[in-house]
């Protein structure tokens, strides 16, 4: 299958976080490719990857980066494809704030969508949602995925031990229809 999503990261150490995007894309049957391209150590490789992504059939790029986190923004500067940045709390990070703010604070004109720190799974879901705009089968799979989340929440409530408290406290679940 032709990859529709590119998952890129600055170093192999980012894979422990970024693999969650791959897992959810696999669950949703969205073809993807993975590459290590560093904005600082391999800038020409990064530029070539971004410039050729659309021509190679990619529709979305997920870029994970820690520290200064230039990879998502620099990638976005070389392509008009949607780029989703995943800030990564790296070994030498300022508790992840450096990468989060670097990705969030893109200048006007070069947007990068940003998910929460270390949340590559949501990046995969967002990429799938973007592709699903023109893929009804994928849209159905996403709807089924969301329904499974809803059922898991409802199931978790059913498994709670309900304690009785004073002052008329009660669980409101029976009052909620959906």
Image (spheres, rainbow, N blue to C red):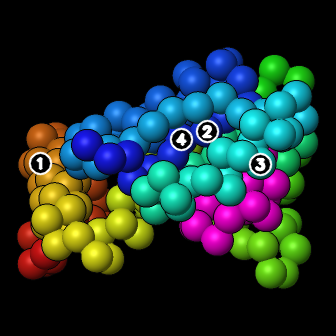
Q: CA distance from mark 3 to mark 4?
A: 15 Å
Q: Earlier in the sequence, mark 4 or mark 1?
A: 4
Q: CA distance from mark 4 to mark 1?
A: 33 Å
Q: Residues within 10 Å of mark 2 (few under 14, many from 20)?
A: many
Q: Secondary structure at mark 3?
A: helix
Task: Please indicate whether residue 124 sits to the left or right of residue 78 in the image.
Answer: left
Residue 127 spot, x, y in % from top left: 44, 59
Is residue 93 rendered to the left or right of residue 164? right
Question: Is 123 covered by the magenta stretch?
Answer: no
Q: Nearer the viewer, mark 3 or mark 2?
A: 3
Span shown in magenta = 71-86
User: Cβ–Cβ below 8 Å for labels 4 and 2?
Assistant: yes
Please name the residue that numbered disc 3 is placed on: 47
Helix, strand or loop at mark 1: helix
In this view, the residue in front, 7 or 140, is 7
Residue at numbered disc 2:
8
In primary-sequence order, the first of circles 1 and 3 is 3
**Residue 154 position by quadrant:** bottom left
Callout 2 secondary element: strand
The residue at the point 71 percent across, 33 percent down is 37
Instruction: Tell me, yes or no, whether the highlighted magenta stretch contains residue 82.
Output: yes
Q: Nearer the viewer, mark 3 or mark 4?
A: 3
The quadrant of the rendering that contains the C terminus is bottom left
For label 3, the crowd category at 10 Å Cα-Cα, with few meaning under 14, some 14 to 19 and many 20 or more, is: many
Q: Tag 2 or tag 1, which sits nearer the N-term?
A: 2
Using the image, tell me which numbered label, if any, was put on residue 155. 1
Residue mark closest to the camera, 1 vs 3: 3
In this figure, which residue is indicated by the disc labeled 4? 7
Mark earlier in primary sequence (3, 4)? 4
Q: Earlier in the sequence, mark 3 or mark 2?
A: 2
Q: Between marks 3 and 2, how big is the CA–CA gap?
A: 12 Å
Residue 176 percent across, percent down from the top left: 15, 76
């Amino acid at each position: 299958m032709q990859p529709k999503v590119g998952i890129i990261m600055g170093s192999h150490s980012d894979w422990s976080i970024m693999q969650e995007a791959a897992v959810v894309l696999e669950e949703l049957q969205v073809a993807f490719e993975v590459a290590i391209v560093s904005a600082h150590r391999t800038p020409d490789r990064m530029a070539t990857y971004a410039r050729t992504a659309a021509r190679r059939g990619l529709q979305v790029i997920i870029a994970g980066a820690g520290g200064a986190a230039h990879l998502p923004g620099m990638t976005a500067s070389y392509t008009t494809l949607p780029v989703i940045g995943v800030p990564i709390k790296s070994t030498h990070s300022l508790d992840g704030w450096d990468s989060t703010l670097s990705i969030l604070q893109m200048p006007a004109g070069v947007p990068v969508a940003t998910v929460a720190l270390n949340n590559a799974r949501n990046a995969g879901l967002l990429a799938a949602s973007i592709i699903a705009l023109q893929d009804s089968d994928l849209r159905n799979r996403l709807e089924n995925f969301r329904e499974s989340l809803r059922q898991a929440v409802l199931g978790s409530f059913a498994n709670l031990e309900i304690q009785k408290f004073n002052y008329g406290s009660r669980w409101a679940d029976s009052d909620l229809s959906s």
